[in-house]
Amino acid sequence: MIDTRWWQRGIFYQVYPRSFQDTDGDGIGDLDGIRRRLDYLAGLGVDAIWVSPIYPSPMADFGYDVADYCGIHPMFGDLEAFDRLVADVHARGLKLVLDFVPNHTSDQHLWFRESRASRDNPKRDWYIWRDPAPDGGPPNNWISNFGGPAWTLDAASGQYYYHAFLKEQPDLNWRNPEVRAAMHDVLRFWMARGVDGFRVDVIWHLMKDADFRDNPPNPGYRPEEGDIGRFLQTHSADQPEVHDIIAELRRVVDEFPDRVLIGEIYLPIDRLVAYYGEDLAGAHLPFNFQLIYASWNAESLAALIEEYEGSLPRGGWPNWVLGNHDRPRIASRVGHDRARAAAVLLLTLRGTPTMYYGDEIGMENVPISPEDVHDPWEKNEPGLGLGRDPERTPMQWDASPNAGFTAGRPWLPVAANFAHCNVAAMLDDPFSILALYRRLIALRRVHPALQTGSYRPVTAHGDVLAYQRELGGESLFVVLNLGGETQRGIALPDGVAEGHVLLSTRLDREEKVTSGFSLRAHEGLVIALSAAT
Ligand code: NOJ
Ligand code: MG
């Protein structure tokens, strides 16, 4: 058996801490809330919890604007609460991964306050300052990811600073060795406190073109992508030098045993896989968001799986992400029936799965009325559907007021369907999507072929997608009907006489099958194959 690490065998579960569980009645989730729900997560069967930022922050971008990398926002708790969380996570055999936001700080971070104080401040070069263009405008044409120019003029010093996101999120200058050293110490600080690894925010942004050349126009621009889509990010991100920076981060992470480095990277597959680094000295897991953008039909899914599998560097470990706090929820993207097939894909494809909180109960995007909008992106570019509040609403625990999330007023509205779409109700329903997730996760434990076995495509035809996972003598056949019609006459792989259904997405059949079996509408099956005799 190959030697594998926990982050290869295991399942990651993303907690958006503001929305998971409130314990102090302020309507915002907190660290003690996560701690209170650890039994649920252990029972679900996930292995590692990634928590979005919990650091002191003015919350201009809900924690992705960090004002102190080595503290805890009082809204979430304090360092003692954090230590309690780490201890309780580890006591259950789980891992805890933090969100590390190195590309930018808050404009309230002490470093930036010093940096902007004057042109000769020792911290000036910790950020990206440039003189105005000859006409007095911004130094180049780069656009903020949240719309509008990526440069803001500091009138007092007469220079612009760069921010890939909000003007309240100035970009750090990673070409400056002092910045790198300070940020490496941040990683060490948390690892010494027991943290098992990091998800690194916008890691492909860390380096920008040394000459700050203009970005070229995007010929395929569609207005619904928002302002950022007007230009290709040729010079503002994904620069060759970023790989040295990541290799350094990796060396720091490797100073501590058995930690993981995950990179957030929105790039096409061929560029994404470069983030494993030369000789795999980069990120252990460059997040693979293909399933978030996939068209939900068998042929295109098969094609993207094949492209991804075929692009991985030798020894590079695959991973799959179905949802996160920045993209519409899976149940809203593909509908409830297909969300079940999506769960099967996520948990049976080769590679580490990352789940987003609430997807296991089929939570949907929640419509947000204009007066409830929090997300700065929605405020900057309203009405395009870019806002991220809909996928960040409170976790639905039970049918009590506010779904058991808070005794106060929740910071975002609770979904209208919470009376039946909640953890407590679904734990009592053996056919619920939560029951499906629990069964799939349990299957992965019992069948190592699902964790670390090989992947072999079998069919992608019409609405039917099928593949095999194999390890040692074990062979599992996964077959999905992505459409609403019954599919008849499905064949087992060549040379296989019969199989045994281990799981159906409908959770109502565990039986022997031979070639020629049927799949009901939207049904997916995991089948253990017996060799032909
Ligand atoms: C990616 C994060 O996931 C997103 O929520 C955030 O707004 C940006 N990075 C900026 O940090
Ligand atoms: Mg709270």
Image (spheres, rainbow, N blue to C red):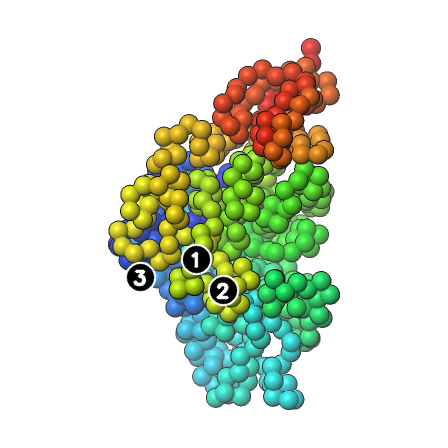
Mark 3 closeness class: few <14, some 14–19, many ≥20 residues within 10 Å: few
Question: Who comes first in sequence, dot 2 or dot 1?
Answer: 1
CB of residue at label 2: within 8 Å of ligand 1? no
Question: Who comes first in sequence, dot 3 or dot 1?
Answer: 3
Q: Residue at x 70, y 66 (%)?
A: 218
Q: Point out residue 373 in the picture as x, y percentages from the top left corner.
A: 43, 63
Quarter of the image that includes the N terminus: top right
Q: Secondary structure at mark 3?
A: loop
Q: Amino acid at mark 2?
A: Glu
Numbered tag placed on residue 378 in the rendering: 2
Q: Which residue is mark 1?
A: 368
Residue 402 falls left or right of residue 503: left
Q: Secondary structure at mark 2?
A: helix
User: Is 314 located above or below residue 372 in the figure?
Assistant: above
Residue 494 falls left or right of residue 267: right
- Asked whether the viewer can see residue 446, the reply is no
Q: Amino acid at mark 3?
A: Pro
Corner quadrant of residue 131: bottom right
Q: Residue at x 60, y 45 (%)?
A: 291
Numbered tag placed on residue 519 in the rendering: none
Q: Point out residue 281 in the picture as x, y percentages from the top left corner.
A: 62, 52
Do the numbered discs 2 and 1 sit on residues whose CB atoms are within 8 Å? Answer: yes
Q: Nearer the viewer, residue 85 or 220?
A: 220
Q: Secondary structure at mark 1?
A: loop
